[in-house]
Every structure is written in C-alpha cells, then in structure tokens.
C-alpha cells in the first residue's frame, strides 16, 4: 500500500513519477491486466494516479492529525464497497461439488477495491499511529515505522542524504577555520 502511494514524484529522493511512464506499473499493482506488449492502458494508468492521489490526501490528513476531506472519505468508502463477491457452484471430476467465491467486477476494479480496503483498514485501525511522513527535507513519501526512531522512507536514499548534509555542515566550519 505505502509502496503504491510512494510512486509519486519526490525531488528529495530523486524519484520520478512511478506511474507516469507509459504503461509502467509498480510492483504493488502487479495484478493489473496488461496488453500483449506487457503495458497497461492509459485509462488504467490514469485511474491508478487518481487512486494514488486519494490515498496521499488521506495519509497526509492522518499524519497531520486533522480531519480528512469528506469527499475523499466518501470516495474511499465507496471504492472499498465496490467488490461484491458472488458464490459460484462448481463441479469437477476430481473433487466433486465445490463452492467458489468469485469477484463480480472486472479485474482492475477488484484491485482498486482491494487497495481501498487496505487503506481503510490501515487508516481506521491502530496501525495508523505508525504511519509517518519521511523526515528528510523536501521528501513527500511515507513510511510505516517499525520502530519509533525510524525517520526516513529509505535509509540509503533520504537517510543517507540527511546524514551526509549533517556531516558536511559539521565539518565545513572546521575546514574554513584552517
């Protein structure tokens, strides 16, 4: 879930838009139907960007401890409800009768609905307190902190930049005094 939201462009991490490249879909959306060439349709990519924006606004409200936009709440709840399941009876020569539950919508709609349900569960549950914005200046990504001291979305990206900048500030003064 957070990997999907973190596909947004971030100048601090030097990460581009993970959904902007034509047909490029991040691993979080690996089940999105693709064409024979392995790409997704522009319509699916637009839907993914809209969904990412919705999640970003909700995550930001949660991190800032403020009320979210009521329209965003209605949108995510409607999307989460969109996946009805239909019981289907099957019979196979090997196993005999069986009951299967199948989604009632197109695969992409099911994926969007599942992502929305995950976001609803995250934002509505106790795990919300572990959702944080990256502490690096200018970074717009989120992290799901495993420990209270965790501050950066990437220890090798943002974390390293912050440590290098701190080191440079400390030692730049010492070098100029020589």
Image (cartoon, rainbow, N blue to C red):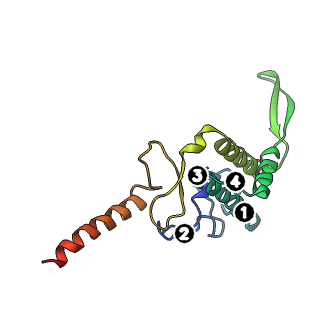
Q: Is residue 46 left or right of residue 105?
A: left
Is residue 27 in view from this perspective?
A: no
Instruction: Name the N-terminal-most of marks 4 and 3.
Output: 3
Question: Which of the labelled discs sits on residue 50, or is there none?
Answer: 1
Instruction: Name the N-terminal-most of marks 3 and 2.
Output: 3
Question: Which of the labelled discs sits on residue 2, or is there none?
Answer: 3
Instruction: Name the N-terminal-most of marks 4 and 1.
Output: 1
- The residue lying at 51 percent from left, 67 percent from top is 15
Instruction: Name the N-terminal-most of marks 1 and 2.
Output: 2
Check whether the beta carbons of the residues at disc 4 and disc 1 lie within 8 A of each other: no
- When asked about the image quadrant of residue 124, the answer is top right
Check whether the beta carbons of the residues at disc 3 and disc 2 lie within 8 A of each other: no
Q: Position of residue 1 (x, y in %)?
A: 61, 49
Question: Which of the labelled discs sits on residue 67, or is there none?
Answer: 4
Q: Is residue 133 above or below residue 175?
A: above
SS under mark 3: helix
SS under mark 4: loop
- Marks 3 and 2 sit apart, C-alpha to C-alpha, by 16 Å
Label 2 Cα crowd, 10 Å radius (few <14 / some 14-19 / many 20+): few
Residue holding disc 2: 16
Instruction: Name the N-terminal-most of marks 3 and 1.
Output: 3
């Amino acid at each position: 879930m957070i990997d999907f939201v973190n596909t947004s462009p971030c100048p601090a991490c030097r990460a581009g838009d993970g959904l902007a490249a034509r047909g490029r879909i991040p691993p979080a959306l690996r089940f999105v139907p693709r064409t024979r060439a392995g790409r997704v349709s522009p319509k699916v990519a637009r839907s993914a960007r809209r969904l990412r924006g919705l999640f970003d606004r909700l995550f930001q409200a949660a991190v800032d401890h403020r009320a979210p936009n009521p329209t965003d709440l209605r949108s995510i709840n409607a999307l989460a409800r969109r996946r009805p399941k239909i019981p289907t009876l099957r019979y196979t020569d090997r196993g005999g009768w069986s009951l299967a539950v199948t989604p009632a919508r197109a695969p992409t709609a099911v994926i969007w609905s599942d992502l929305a349900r995950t976001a609803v569960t995250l934002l509505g549950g106790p795990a919300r307190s572990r959702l944080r914005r990256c502490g690096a200046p200018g970074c717009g990504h989120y992290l799901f902190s495993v420990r209270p001291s965790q501050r950066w979305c990437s220890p090798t990206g943002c974390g390293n930049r912050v440590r290098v900048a701190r080191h440079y500030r400390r030692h730049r003064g010492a070098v100029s005094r020589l």
